Image (cartoon, helix red, strand yellow):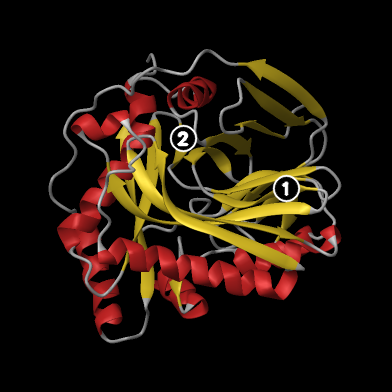
């Protein structure tokens, strides 16, 4: 009897991997540090609690799934909601007041939107659509009794590597490609001071974390990187670790990064938990394969969807600074929600 499974596709791969745990329940952990020396598929929430713990799926069975060619262009969607919901506007005013008062340098505001399908959603079909539409992204589908069923298509590496070579990134700032820009990678865009500053905050934090754990590290960037019809600013970090058995300690320091939380990190984390209208659950956590002696591929769980029968709960967020504006931030979340909305819109009912 299968107790949990995970299907995932690494960026640009022409196949996906399906992992099944056939006996027992996925292991439950309450801190990233508890992942030291562990191996398996990790499903971590934004904030680990007994009700929503870090889950470790044991790969008792493994299957390789060939994938269809990637789509040449993304499907068009109906115009997005032009005006913020009342709940989002209230959250924005609350968060922005804290920024104006100097409580935070940056804080991330997330929200959840619900899409209703005519028939219960086919999770595997949605996963295969996401793989076809988003070749640049890490795509994963996980399902356990504890977490429910989640689909993500994310561009952000939290930690990847094998042997002595490791990588992470600082990904922040968002702009949408339109018209002729869709033919490129965002290299002609002019970035606002807000976007540049937001990305620099994240890169500085990642560098400070690596100084505690890495023997040496090298930073490259920032540069624009495309994810579907969006472009972000990205810095890459390469480094070596003296002991791969303590990867969990590094994850404990990195997660959640300012890209999904804020600065100062602990204060922003507590404020989000106490004030955001919709709990994030496994959105803005991380997931992927963890293997200290093999290949590790862990990604931040962005562009998420929780699948529950006919109800698809879509999650997105954006980083707020003191000069952030309500309408612009709302439109950024709408653009990010398009990732999963395309999969729903083109999946047979």
Task: Give me the disc on residue 77.
Answer: none
Residue 324: % across, % down? 23, 67
Q: Secondary structure at mark 2?
A: strand
- The residue drawn where x is 73% and y is 30% is 19
* Horizontal arrangement in the rendering, residue 194 relative to residue 223 (left or right): left
Dot 2: few (<14), some (14–19), or many (≥20) neighbours within 10 Å? Answer: some
Residue for badge 1: 161
- Work out whether residue 175 can be spotted: yes
Compared to 210, does 291 lie above or below? Answer: above
- The residue drawn where x is 27% and y is 86% is 101
Residue for badge 2: 308
Q: Nearer the viewer, residue 156 or 304?
A: 156
Dot 1: few (<14), some (14–19), or many (≥20) neighbours within 10 Å? Answer: many
Compared to 262, does 35 lie above or below? Answer: above
Q: Earlier in the sequence, mark 2 or mark 1?
A: 1
- The residue drawn where x is 72% and y is 48% is 161
Q: Secondary structure at mark 1?
A: strand
Q: Nearer the viewer, residue 108 or 15?
A: 15
- What whole-number distance in Å separates the C-alpha atoms at marks 2 and 1? 33 Å
Residue 329: % across, % down? 24, 57
């Amino acid at each position: 009897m299968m107790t949990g499974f995970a299907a995932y596709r690494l960026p640009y791969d022409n196949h996906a991997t399906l992992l099944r745990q056939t006996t027992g329940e996925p292991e439950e952990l309450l801190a990233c540090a508890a992942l030291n020396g562990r191996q398996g598929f990790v499903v971590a929430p934004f904030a680990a609690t007994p009700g929503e713990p870090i889950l470790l799926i044991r790969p008792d069975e493994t299957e390789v799934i060939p994938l269809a060619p990637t789509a040449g262009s993304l499907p068009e969607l109906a115009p997005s909601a032009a005006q913020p919901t009342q709940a989002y506007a209230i959250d924005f005013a609350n968060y922005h007041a804290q920024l104006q008062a100097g409580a935070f340098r940056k804080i991330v505001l997330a929200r959840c939107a619900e899409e209703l399908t005519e028939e219960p959603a086919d999770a595997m079909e949605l996963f295969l659509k996401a793989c076809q539409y988003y070749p640049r992204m890490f795509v994963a589908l996980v399902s356990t009794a504890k977490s429910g069923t989640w689909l993500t298509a994310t561009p952000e590496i939290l930690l990847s590597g094998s042997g002595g070579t490791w990588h992470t990134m600082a990904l922040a700032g968002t702009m949408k490609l339109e018209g002729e820009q869709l033919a490129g990678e965002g290299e002609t865009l002019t970035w606002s001071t807000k976007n540049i500053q937001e990305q620099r905050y994240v890169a500085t934090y990642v560098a400070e974390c690596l100084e505690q754990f890495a023997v040496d590290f090298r930073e490259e960037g920032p540069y624009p990187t495309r994810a579907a019809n969006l472009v972000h600013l990205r810095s890459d970090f390469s480094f070596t670790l003296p002991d791969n058995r303590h990867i969990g300690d590094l994850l404990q320091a990195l997660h959640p990064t300012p890209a999904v939380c804020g600065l100062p990190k602990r204060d922003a984390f507590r404020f989000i938990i106490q004030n955001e209208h919709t709990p994030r659950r496994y959105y803005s956590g991380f997931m992927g394969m963890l293997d200290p002696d093999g290949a590790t591929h862990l990604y931040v769980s962005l562009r998420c969807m929780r699948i529950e029968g006919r109800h698809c709960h879509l999650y997105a967020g954006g980083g707020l600074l003191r000069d952030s504006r309500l309408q612009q931030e709302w439109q950024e979340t709408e653009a990010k929600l398009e990732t999963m909305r395309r999969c729903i819109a083109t999946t047979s009912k």
